[in-house]
Amino acid sequence: MHNRLENLIDEMLEGQILLDEAMAEFEKLYIKKALSRHKQHLSKTAAAIGIHRNTLSKRVASYHKQERRIDSRTAKKTARR
């Protein structure tokens, strides 16, 4: 796993990905995968990844909000064409 992470980090550095961006994307994907494994059950997922259920709930809500913003921007760009 260490070698795969090093290769991924090299790719991100070459692509000029900032640390904050990389960490945020990792956390988001980690949480989404954990939720999937636990069939979207917040309490079980929170316990499995070691955070409070309320913290998980807030983070998931923020991801959904970000996705809606991106979707609305995409729809506006498409409508302009």
Image (cartoon, rainbow, N blue to C red):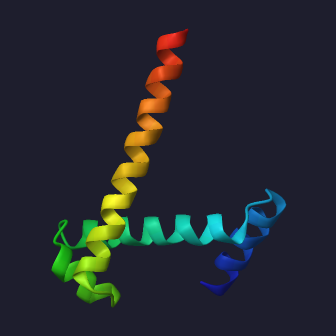
Residue occupying image coordinates x 50% and y 17%: 78
Q: In this view, does 74 lie above or below 67?
A: above
The percent coordinates of residue 27 (x first, y second) are 48, 72
The percent coordinates of residue 69 (x first, y second) are 43, 41
Quadrant occupied by the N terminus: bottom right
Residue occupying image coordinates x 27% and y 86%: 52
Q: Is residue 35 left or right of residue 21?
A: left
Task: Using the image as rendered, state which of residue 4 and residue 16 is in the foreground.
Answer: 16
Q: Is residue 43 above or below residue 67?
A: below
Q: Is residue 65 left or right of residue 39?
A: right
Q: Is residue 48 left or right of residue 6?
A: left
Residue occupying image coordinates x 31% and y 69%: 58
Residue occupying image coordinates x 34% and y 85%: 49
> Furthest residue to the top?
81
The percent coordinates of residue 12 (x first, y second) are 74, 64
Quarter location, residue 23: bottom right
